[in-house]
Amino acid sequence: MCSWVPHYPVPVTIENLTPDFLAFWQQAQGRPLPEQEQLWHELYQARHPDVFEVYQDYGGRLDRDDRLAAALVCFPAHLSTLEPLIHQAPELVTRTAEATRQVFGAAPAELPFVLMVGFFQSNGWADLLHGRQTAFFALEQFTTPQALEITVAHETAHVLHLGEDPARWHEHDVGEKLFKEGLAICASEQVVPGLTAGEYLWFGPGFEDWVARCMERWAELREELLRGLDQQDEATADRHFTYFPDQLGEQGERPTRAGYFVGYQVVSHLTRRHSLGELANWSPTEAKEAVRQVLTTLPTLNR
């Protein structure tokens, strides 16, 4: 079964897979792992093939069979936070989407979302589903409603920004990606105010040491990204925006996902003169040239 949330002031549609997940888990809990895997496919994944095709493409470098087995082992410990969040999520998504639309000053347009439970792979992302730019949220990755709220604002910003023609933005262009991610982070800061930089950059608390490391290495990060601003290969983009756990806490390593921190600093600087709505209307060329100018003229950060 698949439930839909009715339209609110902003036309939000939510394809909600979580009732099917709960129905699956009701039958699967306590059974041997092979039986759980079979029930997952029969009662849950097979009922939503289009969503799982996007989900698996999004994490295509992962061995999803191993991920599913590991997730099934983890679910019992997460149900106490997951089930309440499943029930709160539709209203939270709708409310946060409307707040994000208002921050951008965008005209009401249909905003499609997917709520699901996945393999503890990613918390949220935006991608095409049925030909529409759609925001996806994997609820097993969240422990608090506030973390989900930050992520909803972030991904809604991507959907509003990319609009009906996301292909005009190059997926792996470093300069464009700095702008896109910085814009989404600044949107979440305006929609869910009063938190720390680490919470906006990581969708939850506990990363202030990482923020401090990024600030300490600002000059190095700034110069490296300026040199590679026009690169468009996936490997370079991954170096700046993909999470490498072994680089999170090592003082000798460049901070993982540092591109998010740099993008946040750049767009925060731009919002001193421009609203998010104005920035969202810039072309990819205008956006990247603005990123280049800020990085060139911002040698130090205010602490």
Image: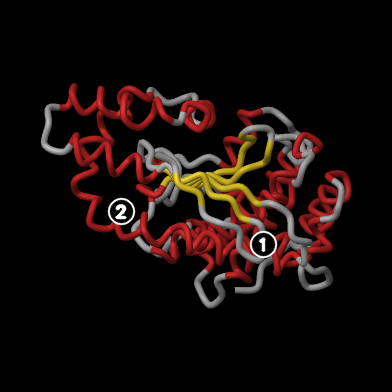
The answer to whether residue 251 is above or below residue 130 is below
Near-viewer residue (151 or 235): 151
Tell us which disc is closer to us: 1 or 2: 1
Residue 247, can we see it? no
Image coordinates for residue 38, horizontal then vertical, percent = 25, 22
Three-letter amino acid code at disc 1? Answer: Val
On residue 26, which mark appears? none
Kindly identify the residue that appears in the image at 48 percent across and 63 percent down. Answer: 91
Left/right placement of residue 38 relative to residue 247 reads left
Secondary structure under the numbered disc 2 in the rendered image = helix
Image coordinates for residue 188, horizontal then vertical, percent = 59, 64
Q: Which residue is mark 1?
A: 10
Near-viewer residue (151 or 177): 151
Kindly identify the residue that appears in the image at 78 percent across and 65 percent down. Answer: 270
Quadrant of the image containing the N terminus: top left
Q: Are marks 1 and 2 in contact (CB under 8 Å)?
A: no
Specify the farthest residue to the bottom.
194
Q: Earlier in the sequence, mark 1 or mark 2?
A: 1
Left/right placement of residue 5 relative to residue 140 reads right
Kindly identify the residue that appears in the image at 77 percent across and 55 percent down. Answer: 295
Q: How many residues crowd mark 1 within 10 Å: few (<14), some (14–19), many (20+)? A: some
Callout count: 2
Quadrant of the image containing the C terminus: bottom right
Image coordinates for residue 39, horizontal then vertical, percent = 25, 27
Cα separation, mark 1 vs mark 2, equals 27 Å
On residue 82, which mark appears? 2
